[in-house]
Amino acid sequence: MELNTIKERFSQNWNKKDILLTFVTMAVFFVRGLVKKIFFKKAGGMVLIGRGVSIRYAHYLQTGKDFIVEDFAEINCKSHQGIIAGDRVTIGKYAIIRPSNAYGGAVGEGLKIGNNSSIGPFAYIGCSGFIEIGNNVIMGPRVGIFSENHHFNNLDLPIKEQGVDRSFVTIEDDCWIASNVVILAGVTIGKGSVIASGSVVTKDIPPFSVAAGIPAKVIKSRIHKN
């Protein structure tokens, strides 16, 4: 890390002891990353891995520069298209990325995350259908994204035995997905949109929209017309 970058990251409110502790923590994460990334399909740069992280079927995982997985996150990489992360991607604490069941069953499609994007703490990314997250996407805690729906029409069969319809979810560049948002299968969230906390997104959101509610509806546009 260059000197100018360090100065930008740590303001005058950081004392030397706290800066040192931060670097010690990062060093431990770095050592774990050196071990883990041996098993990746591809690692384009530095990998930082927190405590208790589980990365299963890591040979389906491709990462760019500065890939960070925080404490106790779980990434199941077994999928047709793999898990693909761009540069400077962060997976938050206790987040779960799950395209497939870890104990057999149908194999899911996977996930692509663009540059400078993050998945927040306690998120659940159910990418059995393909999920694509663009560049510069901010995601708050406890976001749920689901790319499949269960069949439930047959009253004589348990729901879990009736199968699923796989679909997709697309989140375009420069979106802010606030805390506790749920995004359902078959949805595209347009570029530059903001989804308010606690919303449930069931339909497409146009670019540069602010959407809120259950189900989420556009409440205003970020485009200011003269």
Image: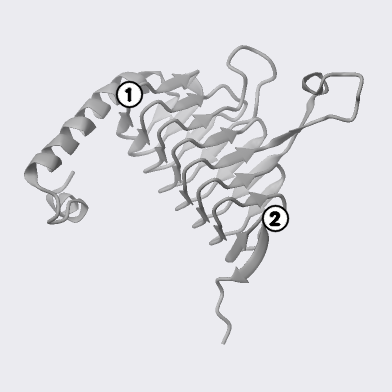
What colour scheme governs how the chains and residues are painted in the rendered image of this protein? Answer: one colour
**Residue closest to the far bottom:** 226
Residue 22, given in percent of the width and then of the height, sits at: 19, 37
Q: Which residue is mark 2?
A: 204
Q: Is residue 93 left or right of residue 10?
A: right
Is 104 placed above or below 58 here?
A: above
Q: Which residue is mark 1?
A: 51
Amino acid tagged 1: Arg
The alpha-carbon separation of the residues under discs 1 and 2 comes to 37 Å
Nearest to the eye among marks 1 and 2: give it.
1
Q: Residue at x 22, y 33 (%)?
A: 26
Chain-order first, disc 1 or disc 2: 1
* Secondary structure at numbered mark 2: loop
Q: Which picture quadrant has residue 159?
A: top right
Q: Is residue 45 left or right of residue 188?
A: left
Q: Residue at x 65, y 49 (%)?
A: 200
Amino acid tagged 2: Asp
**Residue closest to the far top:** 103
Residue 53, given in percent of the width and then of the height, sits at: 39, 23
Q: Mark 2: few, some, or many residues within 10 Å (few <14, many ≥20)?
A: some
Residue 89, given in percent of the width and then of the height, sits at: 40, 41
Q: Nearer the viewer, residue 148 or 144?
A: 144
**Residue closest to the far left:** 16
Q: Nearer the viewer, residue 13 or 99?
A: 13
Q: Residue at x 17, y 51 (%)?
A: 10
Q: Residue at x 58, y 83 (%)?
A: 225
For the C terminus, the image quarter is: bottom right
Query: How many numbered circles are shown?
Result: 2
Q: Is residue 91 left or right of residue 10?
A: right
* Secondary structure at numbered mark 1: loop
